[in-house]
Image (cartoon, rainbow, N blue to C red):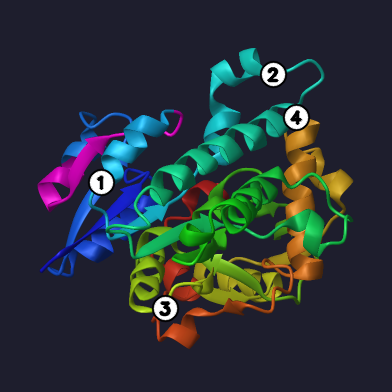
Amino acid sequence: MSKTIVIVGVTGLQGGSVARKFLEDPAWKIRGITRDPLKPASKTLEAQGTEVVAGDLNDPKSLIKAFQGAHAIFAVTDFWAHIHDPQSMEKLKPGQLLNEYACDAEIQQGKNIANAAATLVDTTLELFIWSTLSNVKKWSKGKYTHVYHFDGKAAVTEYIEAELPKLAAKMSTLQVGLYLSNWKMPAFAPQKNAEGVYVLSKPGRGDQPAPFVNVPRDVGKFAYALSQASPRTNLLGASDLISMDQYMALWSAINNVPARYEPCTIAEFTKRFPFEFLGQEVGESAAYDDEFTWHGGDPTIVYPKDLGIETTTVEEYMKNEDWSSALA
């Protein structure tokens, strides 16, 4: 008898990866939730064998309907979607920054997902996989207080633990690391200096391992492995753990150009962003990862190797990418 996994955000990077991986196993039926089942990405998924249904993270009733009969649920929310939505500016409270609003909106959507999933804990649901991140304020002991894209997801995890104990008993968490694709964006990509050396600069030392992830290739593997493990597994979603010094050494060799990593302060990093609050947010997250690690030192964390997951290396990823935009 087949089981059904329902994937929230199935047309996104994480959700799409999960759908493709579970489609490899005929024991699973895949149902994906999206706001628009008629858009091209939805139709592509349908052609591959995924059932695509309408669901709105701001509409709990639509989620309850979409979740019906689910044996497993993979759920992720998108903080950055609220940042990029022009309508978000109209919804700010007096004195509220955009990233503060985005955090509140993400928390509410996460609670809506959790509450809808909780309606199935006494019937079909066996596993709830929540794509989360660590509580930066908690693990940094209040040193870093502006990393809303971490703390919002962590707040949902804590809500489930405190308010939905039956769902918590069936929950596993996935802490997805640094998207490798982000390092081609202008604020992060190596920049050529006056000496002709390509320099990648951000807060944090160069010798600390960082959790890079090839999202399209590996997030599905992480979710599938969690479906084979016992609930209450807290997995670091990292394809490869290498330092920024090692990253730039590989980048230099693959592109045959001189390159290195140079640390900078949060204040220096912030100047690259159109809004100071966004630079502060991203800069503090980089400093936090360097000082406290991506998961903050959580003793419950397990690594892909602990679950026998074969992942992509950073070198493999780099060799298959077009770096012409960064080299221009």
Q: Which residue does the image show at 38% across and 66% down from the upper left?
A: 223
3 or 2: tag closer to the N-terminus: 2
Q: Which mark is residue 68?
A: 1
Q: Is residue 57 magenta?
A: yes
Amino acid under label 4?
Answer: Phe
Residue at 62% x, 76% y: name it: 242
| Residue that badge 2 annotates | 92
Looking at the rendering, the stretch of residues picked out in magenta corresponds to 44-58
- Secondary element at tag 4: loop
Relative to the observer, which residue lies in front, 77 or 198? 77
- Between disc 1 and disc 4, whose residue precedes? 1
**2 or 4: tag closer to the N-terminus:** 2
Ranked by sequence position, the earlier of labels 3 and 1 is 1
Q: Which quarter of the picture shows residue 295?
A: bottom right
Q: Quadrant of the N terminus?
A: bottom left
Marks 3/2: CA–CA distance: 41 Å
Q: Name the residue rendered at 55%, 51% in the picture.
A: 182
Kindly identify the amino acid type of the residue bearing the numbered disc 1: Gln
Q: Are marks 2 and 1 in contact (CB under 8 Å)?
A: no
Q: Are marks 2 and 4 in contact (CB under 8 Å)?
A: no
Q: CA distance from mark 3 to mark 1?
A: 22 Å
Q: Which residue is outermost to the top? A: 90
Residue 129 against residue 253 in the figure, above or below: above
